[in-house]
Amino acid sequence: MTVLSERNSAGVIRVEAAKLFFDRGYDATSLRQVAAASGLKVGSLYNHIDSKEHLLLQIMGGVIDDLVAAAHEAALLDGDAVHKLQAALAANLTFHAEHAQEVFIGNAELRSLSDGARHVVIEKRHEYELFLQGLVEDAGRAGLADVIDAKIHVYSFVAQATHIASWFKPGGRMNLDEIVAIYTKVALRELNVADADARVDQG
């Protein structure tokens, strides 16, 4: 098997496992079911995972890694501290809406991990929150935002994104870009950013 096909198989396993964990729950899903959904034999799964828990950790840790990458990339744009925060928040919201299954699994199945694996996921989340917190603090130091408590603001922004993941469906009254714009305005208003709505409307 080539390296490329190995990578493709790993990706397929992660996607199919996420669907099953979302639909059935982690405990009710067997590796045999994951293998069947992935078009593999059970034994072939162990070329990519050590155990069912390792597969869950790959999904939960991997989605955080992807979220971090998206937010970091978004915040690289030219502009002031609020522009960078705004871009990261929009990326955060969009990612949660587009990865609703993985977000649900991350929240619902954290209890299913052993202490060591749970610590890995919690640390990844903490590092991401610190990244967002840094952007909030930068905006405050620049005199562009009224920061009451940066950590609590971040908790609010993360909760907003998690909320989107719980209800957003394509084809609704508003498209995702419109919804992200509204939530971003809410976040900037929370920080008392001057001309918050105009900033978002201008992109």
Image: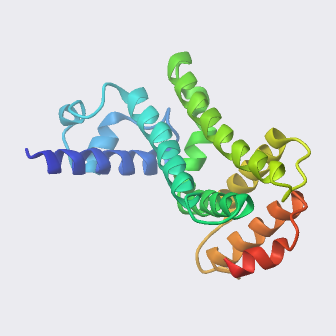
- Foreground residue, 40 or 105? 105
The structure's colour scheme is rainbow
Residue beneath the point at 57% across and 41% down: 106
The answer to whether 35 is drawn above or below residue 57 in the figure is: below
Instruction: State left or right for residue 16 relative to residue 96.
Output: left
Query: Image quadrant for the C terminus?
Result: bottom right
- Foreground residue, 69 or 94? 69
Instruction: State left or right for residue 174 relative to residue 33.
Output: right
Residue 72 in the image: state x and y as whole percent.
54, 52
The answer to whether 58 is drawn above or below residue 163 in the figure is: above
Residue 174 in the image: state x and y as whole percent.
69, 81
Residue 86 in the image: state x and y as whole percent.
70, 63
Q: Residue furthest top?
A: 115
Query: Image quadrant for the N terminus?
Result: top left
Residue 79 in the image: state x and y as whole percent.
65, 66
The answer to whether 140 is drawn above or below residue 77 in the figure is: above
What is the total number of numbered labels drawn onto the structure image?
0
Residue beneath the point at 54% across and 47% down: 68
- Res 196 → quadrant: bottom right
Instruction: State left or right for residue 99 relative to residue 6.
Output: right
Residue beneath the point at 74% across and 61% down: 82
Q: Residue furthest front?
A: 142
Residue beneath the point at 61% across and 70% down: 169
- Res 43 → quadrant: top left
